[in-house]
């Protein structure tokens, strides 16, 4: 298989595993996380002054010794790429999006959208948010926002959504078309603060095993996690599967807060240290809600930063079993410095270390581009897809650390799982990649297939439901109407993937994230392994 094909398979795989699950959740910040809370605003009034201020901040705060004289006269991005892959400059819009995402709240009406046929389709409504209280439902199509027609106007998604966002207390008037209702509905909504949980799904896998999936470590994650634990324990949970796949991290304090719920008192969770940051130990306080039950943590190559802190602590302390594939390998802590114009600098100030002293940060000595392509190289050399290749993992060449139970663990490039589960690439090909990249599966489910089923029917048949051959035939006809060139051989090879994607997207459409993950996990190899491992 040539490099071009391998690369596109990896792209298709990334979409199928992460994009389908997170497409509707808004801005996903998957790599550059591990933050402490930001310091007070520093002023920067023009680009030259901002560069000077950034270099001053580097000199005062950066994790390592840097000759800042060599950084003058470079563009901002080039300055930061000279340091490490995770120090970065955020323009005002991106800085605000990141803050909203990590804080778990924003000002608006509380809906998630998908652009379908140049119309805003409501895919999810935040429980108890302004939109929910005003009667908006998933499946509603937004035709008009205040006095602006948005349907059929070929506006960029950002511009359409921008007309809905606004300050707390301000009103917005929506005209929506609801399936089964002949006349458009007019809804008046007052914008407010909307709280968003970082728990994607929480339910019982069987009579005594609970499942919690966490998408990020935001300001309220430990509270969200505790709330989920209470419900699951009331249902009889004595064992827990904690899913951190594709979790790119977030606040360090959120990871340590969650660790307090599963680790015994006085256990070291993590410590941080840098040139300007003396060693700081984070110790479990005890009294957590799940200190003693059996625990499995699921990780993959997109599990990063704060997620690796938690997985590393559980592994070092022999608290549970780590299942999956080697994690991303981000062991750098950023602190955010805000500028007066709304932009911000995320600057690496320290490294974090697991309780045994492992640094999880993978090497970036070959430069920024090589670092960005490292996951592709893992795919190309077979580490992700071939169980036999895991013995060749570069981590095994590093010095081993020994846990209290005598288990060998390694640092220098992510958390290596205790139980390896290979990436299944059966059916992935160029045609499937096209279906994903052009959002054709999403469009078909939201445009056609969603109306054929009800949420009650899908809920009642969770364990047995699959889309029918008639549905698949309709999908092929839909592609033809969209003038998609169909490679029949590749279509047939990808048919099992397409069937499954249509199934889980239907559950997403009708039952939200919780339904999506319940449906997805039914045939998930890591879930199957976790159930076996926790017996």
Image (cartoon, rainbow, N blue to C red):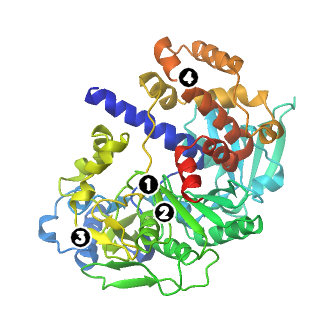
Residue indicated by mark 4 = 495
What's the distance in space between the residues labelled 4 and 1, CA to CA? 29 Å
Is residue 363 visible from the viewing direction of this image? no
Which-is-in-front pick, marks 2 and 3?
2
Question: Which quadrant of the view contains residue 327?
Answer: bottom left
Report how many numbered discs are placed on residues in the image.
Answer: 4
Residue 184: percent from left, percent from top: 83, 34
Q: Secondary structure beneath disc 3?
A: helix
Q: Tell me if label 4 and label 1 are in contact, CB under 8 Å.
A: no
- Look at 44% across and 51% down and name the residue there: 300
Residue indicated by mark 1 = 419
Q: Tell me if label 2 and label 4 are in contact, CB under 8 Å.
A: no
Residue 33: percent from left, percent from top: 42, 63
Which-is-in-front pick, marks 4 and 3?
4
Apparent side of residue 380 relative to residue 453 in the rendered image (left or right): left
Q: Which mark is residue 55?
A: 3
Q: Nearer the viewer, residue 509 or 109?
A: 509
Above or below, 463 against 396 in this view is above
Q: Tell me if label 1 and label 2 are in contact, CB under 8 Å.
A: yes
What's the distance in space between the residues labelled 2 and 4, CA to CA? 34 Å
In the picture, the quarter occupied by the N terminus is top left
Residue indicated by mark 2 = 321
What's the distance in space between the residues labelled 1 and 2, CA to CA? 8 Å
Q: Tell me if label 3 and label 1 are in contact, CB under 8 Å.
A: no
Q: Earlier in the sequence, mark 2 or mark 3?
A: 3
What's the distance in space between the residues labelled 4 and 3, CA to CA? 54 Å
Mark 1: give few (<14), some (14-19) or many (20+) Cα within 10 Å. Answer: some
Residue 477: percent from left, percent from top: 63, 13
What's the distance in space between the residues labelled 3 and 1, CA to CA? 44 Å
Q: Secondary structure beneath disc 2?
A: strand
């Amino acid at each position: 298989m040539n490099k071009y094909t391998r690369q596109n398979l990896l792209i298709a795989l990334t979409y199928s595993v992460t994009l389908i699950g997170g497409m509707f959740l808004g801005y996903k910040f998957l790599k550059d996380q591990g933050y402490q809370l930001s310091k007070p605003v520093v002023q920067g009034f023009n680009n030259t002054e901002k560069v000077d201020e950034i270099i001053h901040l580097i000199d005062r705060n950066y994790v390592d010794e840097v000759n800042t004289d060599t950084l003058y006269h470079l563009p901002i991005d080039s300055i930061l790429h000279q340091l490490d892959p995770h120090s970065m400059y955020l323009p005002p819009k991106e800085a605000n999006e990141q803050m909203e995402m990590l804080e778990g709240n924003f000002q608006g009406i509380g809906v998630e959208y998908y652009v379908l046929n140049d119309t805003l389709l409501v895919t999810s409504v935040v429980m108890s948010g302004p939109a929910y209280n005003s009667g908006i439902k998933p499946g509603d199509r937004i035709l008009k926002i205040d006095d602006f027609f948005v349907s059929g106007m070929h506006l960029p998604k950002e511009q359409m959504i921008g007309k809905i966002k606004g300050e707390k207390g301000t009103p917005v008037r929506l005209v929506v078309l609801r399936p089964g209702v002949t006349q458009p509905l007019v809804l008046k909504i007052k914008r407010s603060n909307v709280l968003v949980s970082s728990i994607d799904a929480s339910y019982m896998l069987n009579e005594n095993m609970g499942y919690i999936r966490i998408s990020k470590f935001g300001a309220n994650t430990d509270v969200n996690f505790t709330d989920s634990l209470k419900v699951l324990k009331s249902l009889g949970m004595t064992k827990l599967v904690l899913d951190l796949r594709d979790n790119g991290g977030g606040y360090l304090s959120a990871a340590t807060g969650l660790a307090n719920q599963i680790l015994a008192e006085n256990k070291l969770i993590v410590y941080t240290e840098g040139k300007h940051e003396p060693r700081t130990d984070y110790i479990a306080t005890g009294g957590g809600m799940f200190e003693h039950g059996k625990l499995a943590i699921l990780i993959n190559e997109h599990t990063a930063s704060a997620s690796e802190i938690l997985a590393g602590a559980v592994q070092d302390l022999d608290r549970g079993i780590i299942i999956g594939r080697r994690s991303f390998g981000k062991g750098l802590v950023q602190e955010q410095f805000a500028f007066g114009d709304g932009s911000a600098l995320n600057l690496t100030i320290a490294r974090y270390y697991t309780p045994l002293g492992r640094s999880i940060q993978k090497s970036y000595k070959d430069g920024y581009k090589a670092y960005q392509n490292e996951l592709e190289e893992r795919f190309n050399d077979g580490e992700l897809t071939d169980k036999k290749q895991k013995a060749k993992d570069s981590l095994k060449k590093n010095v081993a650390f020994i846990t209290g139970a005598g288990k060998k663990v390694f640092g220098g490039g992510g958390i290596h799982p205790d139980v390896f589960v290979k990436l299944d690439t059966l059916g992935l090909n160029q045609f499937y990649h096209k279906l994903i990249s052009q959002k054709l599966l999403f469009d078909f489910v939201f445009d056609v297939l969603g109306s054929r089923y009800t949420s009650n029917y899908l809920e009642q048949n969770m364990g047995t439901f699959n889309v029918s051959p008639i549905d698949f035939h309709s999908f092929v006809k839909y592609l033809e109407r969209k003038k998609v060139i169909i490679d029949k051989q590749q279509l047939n090879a990808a048919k099992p993937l397409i069937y499954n994607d249509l199934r889980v997207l239907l559950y997403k459409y009708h039952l939200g994230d919780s339904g999506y993950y319940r449906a997805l996990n039914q045939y998930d190899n890591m879930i199957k392994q976790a159930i076996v491992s926790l017996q």
